[in-house]
Image (spheres, rainbow, N blue to C red):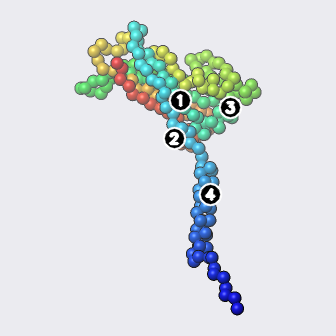
Amino acid sequence: MHSAAPSTHRPGSRASGAARVLVRLLLLTLAALTLLLPVRAAAPELTSFELSRAEDGLHLDYSVNFELPRGAEEALGKAVPLYFIAEAEVFRSRWYWRDKRVASASRSWRIVFQPLTFTYRVTFAGISQSYSSRAEAFAAIRRGVHWKIAEPGQLEDGASHYVEFSFRLDNSLLPRPMQIGIGDTPDWALAVERVQRVD
């Protein structure tokens, strides 16, 4: 009578195998859920910001790097005009009272996709220009060069001044029905700010 061959099956190995399968399934499920989550656009950032004083006043050079949030991206693709605004306010510091605003300047852009010609039309200071690519169109919006934000007489000699700057997607100019429900939702939020002293 032959004796039975010793079993190579270790106690608990079946349970540990099931646990490994369960862990793999859990990891695959988490990966799938991650892919389904909405991708949020990277926060806009000022890649350059420089103030310079000259005989004719105070000038600002800046560059903003940004991606359109999802809601704005979809709207632009459907030929809905988007509006961007840059604002700069110049303040004189006062120790005895609130700082005094001595100058302010703003500029705005309108961009719209034209599906018939597959071009982007950008309007700035009443002048419109068409661009064959989206990158070229947004390049015209992202930068400000030698922008005069204060006259020379508005800056007092010997006083301390600083500039509050903002650049944002202006949702208040969207068609009225689209403004309902937008509020400050991430799908439509695009803004960057900077405060800098004037040397």
Instruction: Measure how far apart labels 2 and 3 are at the Cα level.
Output: 22 Å
Which residue is label 1 attached to?
Answer: 65
**Position of residue 169 in the picture relative to residue 198 (left or right):** right
Looking at the image, tell me whether mark 3 or mark 4 is earlier in sequence order: 4
Structural crowding at the residue carrying mark 3, measured as other residues with C-alpha within 10 Å and reported as few (<14), some (14–19) or many (≥20):
some
Q: Name the secondary structure under disc 3.
A: loop
Q: Tell me which amino acid carries mark 1.
A: Asn
11 or 131, nearer to the observer: 11
Q: Residues within 10 Å of mark 1 (few under 14, many from 20)?
A: some
How far is the residue under mark 2 from the one under mark 1?
Answer: 20 Å
* 159 horizontally vs 74: left or right: left
Q: Quarter of the image holding residue 108?
A: top right
The residue carrying pointer 2 sits among few (fewer than 14), some (14 to 19) or many (20 or more) residues within 10 Å by Cα, namely few
Return the disc, 1 or 4, that comes first in the chain's sequence: 4
Name the amino acid type tagged 2.
Asp
Q: Which residue is mark 3?
A: 79
Element assignment for label 2:
loop
Q: Nearer the viewer, mark 4 or mark 2?
A: 4
**Residue 153 at x, y percent in the picture:** 36, 11
Q: Amino acid at mark 3?
A: Ala
Q: Residue at x 63, y 76 (%)?
A: 8
Question: Do the residues bearing badges 3 and 1 touch, measured as CB atoms within 8 Å?
Answer: no
- Picture coordinates of residue 63 (x, y %)? 51, 24
Above or below, 68 against 18 in this view is above
Extreme residue toward the front, this view: 1
Relative depth, front residue between 25 and 165: 25
Q: What amino acid is at disc 4?
A: Leu
Does label 4 or label 2 sit earlier along the sequence? Answer: 4
Q: CA distance from mark 3 to mark 4?
A: 39 Å
The answer to whether marks 2 and 1 mark residues whose Cβ atoms lie closer than 8 Å is: no
